[in-house]
Image (cartoon, rainbow, N blue to C red):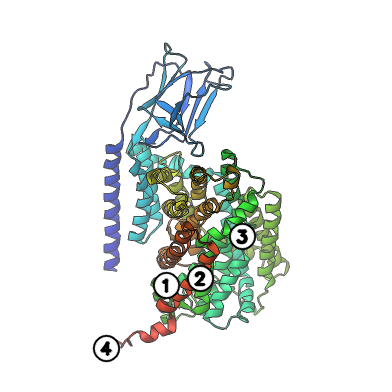
Amino acid sequence: MHALHERQNSAMLISRVVLLLLFFLSLFLTQSTFGADEKNSPRFRVESPKVQLNGLPIPRLRIVALTEEGEIDTSFNQQAVIKGVQLTEGGSERPLPEFEAGVLEVRSNSEKDQRLILVGSSISVAMNEQATAVISPVQTRPGWVSLIPPLVAIILAIWWQEVVGALFLASLAGMMLLATNPFSGMIQVIDPLILSNLASRGNMQIILFTMFLGAMIGIMSGSGGTQALVERLTVYVRNRRHGQLMTWLLGLMIFFDDYGNTLLVGSTMRSMMDRLKISREKLAYLVDSTAAPVAGLALVSTWVGVELGYMRTAYESLGLSTGEIYQTFIATIPYRLYPLLTLIFVGQIAWTGRDFGPMLKAEQDRQHDNDESTSSVKGDFTDGSKPMIRHALIPLATLCLCLGIALYHDFEESSRALLLASTGAVFAAVLSVVISRSCSLGETMKMGIDGMQQMLPAVVVLVLAWSIGTVCNPEHLNTAGYLVDSLGDHLSPRWLPLITFLLAAAVSFATGTSYGTMGLLIPLAVSIELQLLLGLSIPFEEIGNHPLMLATIGSILGGAIFGDHCSPISDTTVLSSAATGCDHLSHVRTQLPYALTVATIAICLGYVPIALGISPYISIIAAIVVQWLVLRIIGREVEEANSLEPVRKPLK
């Protein structure tokens, strides 16, 4: 107990020191500009980032012409005198466009090599050279400060073994860097940062989907449906190998969405894995390393719409053909080496029963545990009634059916489809239990509420992880933009897939999001690869399906998942921990060596040979063999590892 108090006191002291350092850092970095004159006529309104990283382009500039009443002057269609910002395209300066219906909006565009550069400490706009200008000050920061929030989150989460506090402090650090003064940043971390993420329609759909799915799981478990399903599956599961293979196969079957896969498989298999004395860390790994890879590789899933959208936008902006973009998307699958090899590696681990590193230690600890089960949700049948498997099958079938219908009618908005499907599944679960008179309506609703409460910790971390993503996005600190810009321009088309894989992994690890990483890097990498391939005299019409272009896109899609698997602030990593009842940092610590092993093999036997012109299919076969050898050489079965340990004599 004394050691616990010391650890808590140390954590409090460290947090205070970190806050104090961030306070002084913010004061040091802030460059206040007071160029605005209160007497200036509010003829224009400048909408641009108030904080800009040195050397990086401004993502968006919007200037609105106003009437005397403060409304948009739609009759204003002319050029204005704008100073403090410069537009370049292909390295040459270009004039800013004219106003259209009172609005001038221009963005930096990596595909067109179009950049908006801040050339002063403020942006001024005037009707002409003689008119009084409206001045909008812009504060500048060194580029490296954009790395502070993700580094704070990752370092403190690993150091303290606690995620919520680390994420909150990281969000606070980001807002203090973005605000005009540190005190304002402390306030803005709640409003607008956290509140804006809660107010986001897409985010709220994910939150409600998670809560409703938790309610469905609670009803399935409380009514005995999950127990009946597990008992039915247990007929085919006789040992640890069967349990792990069953988890892997279920993960492959639920390919339509990574969130749904994680929550369903994790919660369904939890009690069975406890009975087989398989650690929660192992279950979390099996679930997490199956969910995103299978959803990312599936021909139809919630990921496909997002990935296709990024590819289509990039191709259209460069003039590449999009008539067969889906076929191009499928052609990238052999180059998505990390998710492909991860799915195979999970199956190899399940089949051999071998582990290494922290995972082997977790498995040994579970074997030494005398508890038969640590499952937190069980059905209570005091009347001796037998659990009904339909209480699990009906909600699951409804979820899959509703999701398929919703995606068919609205394929581009997967979050809404998930929400509608989970809503229908909850209704089906309630009706199944109440109509069969297994439980009363009040008891059923309580089961659902209990299930929702189990998802609250995951929701809190999700909201804070989204907040970190907002702080780091291009409209704010632009962390990914800084990483990309630091890469440099000296690239080779053959080595670009390897470089983009590493860059995607770094960005995804730092920001905790696969989707955001893909959205940033696909347009940029496609544009760079296009220019490099044109330099090799490749015909323009062949570039869209050129192997190196496919490899570049595939490496981003794979690298984003790799970084997501390693990141403690990733939403899917958080959900995997929550669904399986595993300590979050324990899940990250035990999964990391496996993810690094597969990524290293993908690099050495995949992207390096691809750069040398070797077929990806040969690389995949070689990588599978090497993965098997790794498990045979350094992996150990739990029983074998226990037999090698010295016998512990009881203390007298």
| Residue 125 visible in rendering | yes
Q: Secondary structure at mark 1?
A: helix
Query: 427 or 577, which lies in front?
Result: 577
Q: Nearer the viewer, mark 4 or mark 1?
A: 1
The disc, 2 or 1, on the residue closer to the chain's N-terminal end is 1
Per the image, the residue denoted by label 4 is: 652
Q: Residue furthest top?
A: 130
Q: Where does the image place residue 242, in percent across and percent down from the top left? A: 56, 79
Classify mark 2: residues with Cα within 10 Å, few (<14), some (14-19) or many (20+).
many
The residue positioned 56% from the left and 60% from the top of the image is 334
The residue that appears at 34% across and 34% down in the rendered structure is 140
Distance, label 4 to label 1, CA atoms, is 31 Å
State the residue in front, 558 or 469: 558
Tell me the distance, in whole angstroms, between the alpha carbons under discs 3 and 1.
Answer: 28 Å
Report helix, strand or loop for mark 2. Answer: helix
Among numbered discs 4 and 3, the one appearing first in the sequence: 3
Return the residue at label 3. 298
Where residue 125 is drawn, which disc sits there? none
Q: Amino acid at mark 1?
A: Met
Q: Which residue is mark 1?
A: 359
- Mark number for residue 624? 2
